[in-house]
Amino acid sequence: MAACLIALGSNLGDRTATLDAAIAALSATAGVQVVRCSAWQLTLPVGGRRAQPEFFNGAALIETSRGAADFHALLQQIEVQLGRQRHERWGDRTLDLDLLLYGDAVIDSPALTVPHPRMSFRHFVLEPAVQIAAPMVHPEIGWTLERLLEHLDGGADCVALVAPSATARRELAAALRERFGLTEGAPSIADERLWPTSSTAWLTVPDGQMSSEHPKLTILLDSPTASEAGRGPTLQIPPTKGDNADREIFAAIAAVWPRLGSRGDQRLQ
């Protein structure tokens, strides 16, 4: 049996009833056991259009004899059964079931990425996950879920932009300064392996704290270097992202610093 962690979310219809129904459907499925489920918590949407209804989010710890691809297909099937329709990314949804962790597996296929690529820096994912599975380890970053959540609260309020191209770093830094009012500046970093001086640009959050040596967020942009143990919350943008990269990065900033998300929206008005 594999120990799996899933995230649940809903912002349409009777949200908590839908989440309860999803847990019931999982419990009734052969080869699946719901070990623990978090409380449902009300959260603001991240990444989608403004004025979306609020979400109820939660997490469940599952043990399953199904393989990762089969279990992921099951989650998608339950989404559809309970009314999920896929019209736009980060849009309103009746039900969202994301496979966050499947044991210590690292999977990168066209249909499935595990660990979930955005779980390490999202409060609304980590907070319920820590309620039920605090000791679970992110297999790429090497930190427990509890440590990741604590770092989002206590890490340095800065972003490390790691990219082999100086042009890419410069253009991204300019976009983040313009949208969020970030400024140049770095904490006192000792580990050159994780944030090489030759390929890292640093931006700080206005009125943020810099007492930690680790940034709250690292962005790997078109980098041949995969996520490494010790970096903490990380977003990796592969070259294939293309025009979607900016939106992905802006959503990550807004997830880590919600007040900057509101500021970014105001700059677009």
Image (cartoon, rainbow, N blue to C red):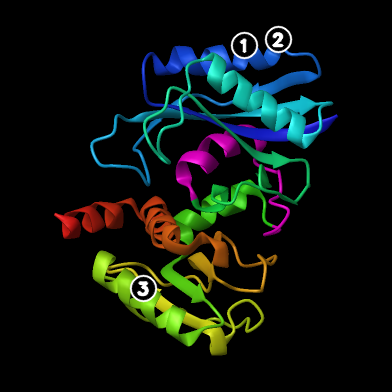
Q: Which mark is residue 24?
A: 1
Q: Is residue 105 left or right of residue 222?
A: right
Quadrant in the picture for the C terminus: bottom left
Question: SS of the residue at dot 2?
Answer: loop
Residue kind at label 3, given as amino acid type: Thr
**Residue appearing at x 77%, y 27% in the figure:** 63
Quadrant in the picture for the N terminus: top right
**Outermost left residue:** 269
Reply yes or no: does residue 176 show up in magenta.
no
| Residue range (magenta) | 122-142
Residue pointed to by mark 3: 204
Q: Is residue 237 visible?
A: no
Disc 2 to disc 1: CB gap under 8 Å? yes
Reply yes or no: does residue 141 show up in magenta.
yes
| Mark 2 burial class by Cα count in 10 Å: few <14, some 14-19, many 20+ | few
**Residue appearing at x 63%, y 12% in the figure:** 25
Q: CA distance from mark 3 to mark 1?
A: 44 Å
Question: SS of the residue at dot 3?
Answer: strand
Q: Which mark is residue 132?
A: none
